[in-house]
Image: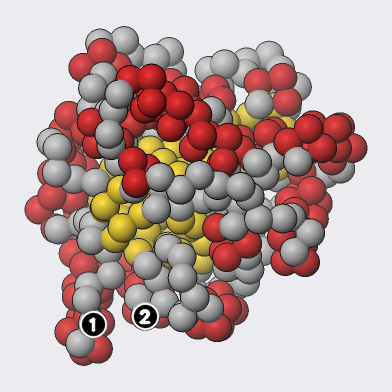
Amino acid sequence: MRRLYRLARPAIFRLDPERSHGLSIAALKSGLVPRADTPVDNRLRVAVAGIGFPNPLGLAAGYDKNAEVPDAALRLGFGFAEVGTITPKPQEGNPKPRVFRITAKEAIINRLGFNNQGHAEAFARLSARARKPGIVGVNVGANKDAIDRVADYVEGINVFAPVASYLTINISSPNTPGLRALQSGSELDRLLRSAVAARDGYAALSGTAKTPLFLKVAPDLTEEQIEEIAGQVTRRGIDGMIVSNTTLSRAGVTGLPDATEAGGLSGAPLAARATYVLARFRKALGPDMPLIGVGGIDSAAEAIRRIEAGADLLQLYTALVYHGPELPGAILRGILRYLDRAGIDSLRELRDRNVDAVLANPPVI
């Protein structure tokens, strides 16, 4: 399959990126993509926020925006899948074209702007799969025209708490004007306080366990902002953090075709920055807060680096565009080979090994 994808990629890349994405969703829906040969090994298991993950590798939000194919994604070998970002009302997002491949660097720039079908469509799909196995998180956001964006997040939590393995508050997208302002100050405090109250309120009314609540932040944060966010998530009882989303930086792609397009950059050039911010959050939060590392993960070696920099779990998306559907299995097998060579019995033994080394070498921004 991996060789087949390499042969097919030139033809796929002649298509508009959004059209290619839609075709991949259609292929997963149709069952054309076979179940991956995924390694099952107790050394890959990770417990985070009361959830037992079969392996640490997840599909990041942004791929399955409308919860159309979470189970098909899990069959690719992912230990979990995150759908969304989903907003209360359907919205078209920003004008097209709005996705650009930077193929020479295995990167993508997008300015999609939370294009999705809204709560009702996604909730219906997730309700239909509610009794199926597999960990599926729901990433919630705010509509671009929302008068009160905090209220949109609260609505998302109330709607999806019954059907989500965990919930992610996404305030990290650069493509909704003003959204990243929620990452600091009184607005962040109000958001977290309201989100936790909504989650706890649903659990109390339904008599069910509290759904884990994660916060997703951007890589374009100063050290002062990281310290502030760390303090607030600890004080408000957030269950984990996802670090990070796309970057506004163009480090690593300057001068390449389409590199000046507006939007967030993802893929390989983001790896160093995402790893550094992850390590900075691990340092600020200490050993107990679960962290999910995202951004530029495209190999077993990069996955291991992210765990050593503080990640409990990992997510990827852009690398699938460049390496195809067999990538999750290849990464997991590579991790197991590393554990075999090192004589390590669990991923927890790897975590945090290189936090200080990463922080001693800040990346170029």
Image point (46%, 70%), residue name: 133
- For the residue pair 296 and 197, the one nearer the viewer reads as 296
Image point (72%, 19%), residue name: 104
- For the residue pair 355 and 139, the one nearer the viewer reads as 355
Q: Quadrant of residue 227?
A: top left
- Per the image, label 1 sits on a secondary structure element best described as loop
Q: How is the image coloured?
A: secondary structure
Q: Quadrant of residue 327?
A: top right
Residue 46 shown left or right of residue 203 in the figure: right
Figure quadrant of the C terminus: top left
- What's the mark number on residue 199? none
Instruction: Give percent across and percent down for residue 141.
Output: 44, 62
Residue identifier under label 1: 208
Residue identifier under label 2: 162
Figure quadrant of the N terminus: top right
Instruction: Give percent across and percent down for residue 247.
Output: 49, 33
Q: Residues within 10 Å of mark 2 (few under 14, many from 20)?
A: some
Residue 299 shown left or right of residue 340 in the figure: right
Among the two numbered marks 2 and 1 on one chain, the one whose residue lies closer to the N terminus: 2
Image point (30%, 17%), residue name: 358
Q: Is residue 174 visible?
A: no
Q: Residue furthest top?
A: 361
Instruction: Give percent across and percent down for residue 286.
Output: 13, 36
Q: Residues within 10 Å of mark 1 (few under 14, many from 20)?
A: few
